[in-house]
Amino acid sequence: MGVFDFLKKKKEPAYDVTNLSVADLDEGFVFDYNLKSWVVKEVYQYDWGKNVFSKEYKIDAGDETAFLSVSNDGELFLTVTKPIKIQQLGDGLREQIRKNEAAPDKLDYEGVTYYLDEDSAGYFNDITAKNPDWEELVSYEYLNEDETLVLGISQWDERNFDAYAGKVIKPYEISNITPDE
């Protein structure tokens, strides 16, 4: 630290520290959700084309890890999910998607029927990586009938698939957002 470092202006944050919202989350931020404090460990960005972007945060509460997805198409849409094995969604699902170049219109998982809500081709970027590269993907997102539960499949290439399940949450369920100090 130099003698005159205290005279340098501190970099101003890109958010209002007195009015933080879920849209301001970044790596290191802490927030409360579902009676636990969570830390944002990683930040991912998705580019869906036509200037449509969404973010996803790998979050950790110490005893569990999850993913918080935040998108805004005029209205904030939030989900909290955990990875599942794609085999849990039915035998031959990967082959069916590859053959048809599309996912089925509905899927059953743990006794709940999910309906295809959206399928989108886009690009993924791990913002927190040292050398972030954009990767292509196709995403299939399903919602249950009352739109409280979410199920998703991401296809990264011909043979690589990820799946996740969780729930849709409201912005007010996330509170006490604190930036990384």
Image: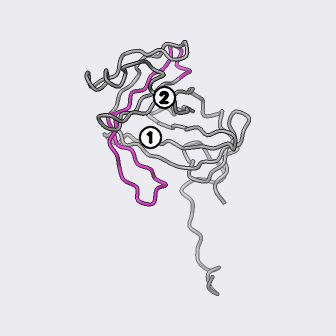
Asked whether 139 falls inside the magenta stretch, the response is yes
Q: Residue furthest bottom?
A: 3
- Residue shown at 57%/33% (left/top)? 80
| Crowdedness near tag 2: few (<14), some (14–19) or many (≥20) residues, C-alpha within 10 Å | few
- Residue shown at 51%/29% (left/top)? 84
Quarter containing the C terminus: bottom right
The prevailing secondary structure element of the residues shown in magenta is strand
- x, y percentage for residue 77? 51, 31
Q: Secondary structure at mark 1?
A: strand
| Quadrant assignment, res 155 | top left
- x, y percentage for residue 115? 43, 16
- Residue shown at 62%/85% (left/top)? 2
Q: On the image, numbered disc 1 is attached to which residue?
A: 54
Q: Which mark is residue 135?
A: none
- Please tell me whether residue 129 is drawn above or below residue 124 in the rendered image: below
**91 left or right of 75 in image:** left
Q: Residue furthest right?
A: 35
For the magenta stretch, what is the residue range? 121-149
